[in-house]
Amino acid sequence: ATKDWKGLRVMCKLIVQNRQAKVEVNPSAAAMVIKALKEPHRDRKKVKNVKHSGNITLQQVIEIAKFTRGKSMARNMKGTVKEILGTAQSVGCTVDRKPAHDIIEAISSGEITIPEYEAPAPKEAGAHPPAGGKKH
């Protein structure tokens, strides 16, 4: 399940149902930004303090924001995109060949418009009816 994320730290959710374990990958925004940079895999034990100096497009940022919309605390999609741009800034990459903060300012001033998107409601894993057997 985590083969696609080799060399990156991602959070995994372990769902156990009827003694069967399923692994669900929940990547962080930073992991998705680094994956979008399409950098070669690295061994985290040997290679430390990597500078991610690549470039991603605003469209890729919007796709990442759509994926993380459910986890985001922002009221609207514009805020979620700004969260991802802030992550891109801290990772050290550029967006459309510009520093990420310039794009954030352009979104705030209204130069760049972000289409609204509402995340689907999260499905409950392993949801079962409330326990309420016989009462004596």
Image (cartoon, rainbow, N blue to C red):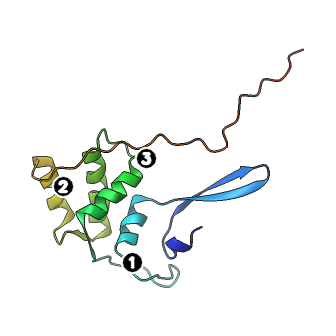
Which residue type does callout 2 highlight? Ile
> Picture coordinates of residue 17 (x, y %)?
74, 49
Residue located beneath label 2 in the image: 104
> Picture coordinates of residue 23 (x, y %)?
63, 59
Q: Which residue occupies the foreground of this view, 79 or 123? A: 123
Q: Which residue occupies the foreground of this view, 117 or 96? A: 117
User: How many labels were placed on the picture?
Assistant: 3
Q: Quadrant of the C terminus?
A: top right
Mark 3 or mark 1, earlier in chain: 1
Residue at point 34%, 54% (across, down): 65
Label 1 secondary element: loop
C-alpha distance separating marks 3 and 2: 20 Å
Residue at point 57%, 69% (across, down): 2
C-alpha distance separating marks 1 and 2: 26 Å
Q: Quadrant of residue 54?
A: bottom left
Q: Which residue occupies the foreground of this view, 7 or 112? A: 112
Label 3 secondary element: loop
- Residue at the far top in the pictured view: 136
Local packing at callout 3 (Cα closer than 10 Å; few below 14, some 14-19, many 20+) is few
> Picture coordinates of residue 75 (x, y %)?
31, 38
Residue at point 9%, 52% (across, down): 111
Q: Left or right: where does residue 120 sit relative to residue 102?
A: right
Which residue type does callout 3 highlight? Lys
Residue located beneath label 1 in the image: 49
Nearest to viewer (mark 3 / mark 1): 3
Q: Give yes or no for contact between labels 3 and 1 (Cβ–Cβ under 8 Å).
A: no
Residue located beneath label 3 in the image: 71
Q: Quadrant of the N terminus?
A: bottom right
